[in-house]
Amino acid sequence: MNQAEANKSKDFKVYLRLLSYLKGYWWAGVLVVIGFAINAGTEVSVAKLIKFIIDAINNNDHSARNLFPFLVVLLIFIRGIGSVMGSYFLAYISRGLVFNLRKEVFNKFLQLPPSYYIENSTGHITSKILYNVEQVTAASTEATQTILRDGLVVIGLLGYLFYTNWRLSLSLLIVAPVIGFLVRRASKRMRKLSSEMQATMGDVNHVVQEAINGYSVVKSYGGQTFESQRFERFSLLNLKRGLKLVITASISTPIIQVFMAIALAIVIWIALRPEILGDTTAGEFVAYLTAAGLLSRPIRSLTDVNEKIQRGLAAAHSIFNIIDMPSEQDSGTQSPVLTGKIGFEQVGLRYSQDADNKMAIQNFNLQIKAGETVALVGRSGAGKTSLVNLLQRFQPVTSGKITLDDIALEDIKLSALRSQVSTVSQQVILFDRTVRENIAYGQLASKTDEEIIAAAKAAYAHDFIMALPQGYDTILGSQGNSLSGGQRQRLSIARALLKDAPILILDEATSALDNESEHYIQAALQNAMKCRTTIVIAHRLSTIEQADRIVVMDKGRIMEVGRHEELLAKNGLYAQMYQRDFDHDLDIGLGTEDQADSDAIIPSAKPAP
């Protein structure tokens, strides 16, 4: 099988797959065919009606003449009924198809592994679910409507022509091979351009989302011109692809029309010679020419529809590629209630998109007791965040093994694993919902108001929540931008407290906060860490001095392990990092006494009031 045949086979399978989504709409499909069949029947009836009136004039039939105006009105009325019936129920089917596809694609995105989101931009992802799915409408509504409505008209008119004079009508088929060749060449070109246009639309969407989400940086750093130029560049690419698509369709259609006109001209030339046409009435003669002339409009529509089909097929291929992607693998069979004991044994990690093929983590060995607090420190890129991502199975382990309560991580069901790990990070995610819904999110939605309020109080968030216009029923808006950074962070801690998981991960949870916000958040974190195994990732070493153990990492390896005092006494990498951190605090005007007054993430004192 050559490439062209393979592509045809793929297209046919895509169409069949699209049709499989329409099983529940079979009754509407029947009404669509009936409606367009009625519409096609009226087109053929136009030729018969002309024959009827001409024969009536030649035969001086007054009753037939009087009936003609009524028949014209009746014909148009019936055509309208058929057209409305076919168009409405086809749109009903099409919107249902788009709804089902969009829902399935969105659900698939929720099931894809985190690595997919690392390797693909948000703009391209949202473009597939919004723009590409909508493009299927071109194939499922506009194209199908044209194929059914005008296709039935062509079949009806050709049937009438062949019934009237099959020998003469055969001349219409002379140009069929040429038209088929032109359509095939144009289809390949339009398919390629449609795919490129959808890709550039993803680029446009990506630029828009980045500019909107980062509006504060854009405005603060005067990036309006840069973003405008970037948007113009990708929009121009999309425009060029679109224009190439239009010109391909625009050129192919008139060329095909020329060949159809040649065929019709041959038919008319032959029909105007009575010795060839045979013994026919004037009405039959005019009716035949009328039917032949009526072929032009539906055939033109059928040639125009090729561009819509190719756009729809390109979008459908893109959508089904997403749907067919393997979901996040869950090989786990156990749902244990964990105590928080964690084991890393010769763990290694290599990212698939790393061109240098370097190990992000290598030969990592560490045993964490239940209830122990362990801090991970090191330079950026040392592998700290990668390590906690492995713990939640956001990335598969390349080598080695991770255990929880001596159970291999892969043997624990994902739902059971992630329900027993809470994360508080610098990047707080809030949704455009109420405060209550943001705290009791997802699997926590069944929690009572008393439990939600208790978690908020423990996170030192209750007071500012009650000061909001509707308290816990206040809608936060996009990303909760109406709140301060400290308030948003405390809501994140309240969510973690409400989850009440035995393992807590703090990933730079207090960085870039003012002193007052940090004071409340550190006090809230003390409550969150009680009776839990806690892994703390921090750049500010002064905040992890009271950890049970400090693990110093560099280039994915463990360099040192011990308590704060032990590591300082070694005068190794940790001591160097701590001295730099201390010197930095002095440089920004923070003295040792002020530093001591600042609460730590892991202090030995009781929670701040």
Image (spheres, grey):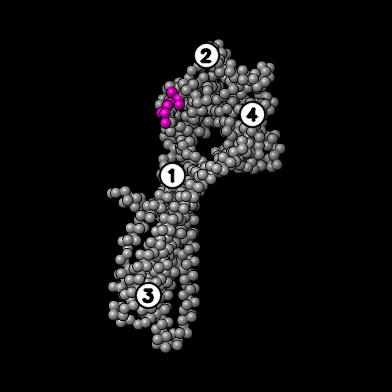
Q: Does 228 sit left or right of 48 as displayed?
A: right
Q: Position of residue 329 (x, y in %)?
A: 42, 36
Q: Position of residue 239 (x, y in %)?
A: 49, 50
In the displayed structure, would residue 106 be above or below residue 163?
above
Decide which of tag 1 and tag 2 comes sooner along the chain. 1
**Residue at left offset 41%, top offset 55%:** 248
Q: Are marks 4 and 1 in contact (CB under 8 Å)?
A: no
Foreground pick, 15 / 339: 15
Range covered by the magenta-colored residues: 355-362
Mark 3 vs mark 4: in front: 3
Q: CA distance from mark 3 to mark 4?
A: 83 Å
Decide which of tag 4 and tag 1 comes sooner along the chain. 1
Q: Are marks 1 and 3 in contact (CB under 8 Å)?
A: no
How packed mark 2 is, by other alpha carbons closer than 10 Å (few <14, some 14-19, many 20 or more), is: few
Which amino acid type is marked by label 1? Ile
Q: Position of residue 36 (x, y in %)?
A: 43, 66
Mark 1 vs mark 2: in front: 2
In the displayed structure, would residue 578 be above or below residue 415?
above
For the C terminus, the image quarter is top right
Decide which of tag 3 and tag 4 comes sooner along the chain. 3
Tell me the chief SS of the magenta region. Answer: loop
Q: CA distance from mark 1 to mark 2?
A: 49 Å
**Residue at left offset 70%, top offset 42%:** 469
In magenta stretch: residue 244:
no
Q: CA distance from mark 4 to mark 2?
A: 30 Å
Which amino acid type is marked by label 3? Leu
What residue would you read off at disc 4?
513
Q: Does 360 sit left or right of 428 as displayed?
A: left
In the picture, the disc for residue 289 is 3
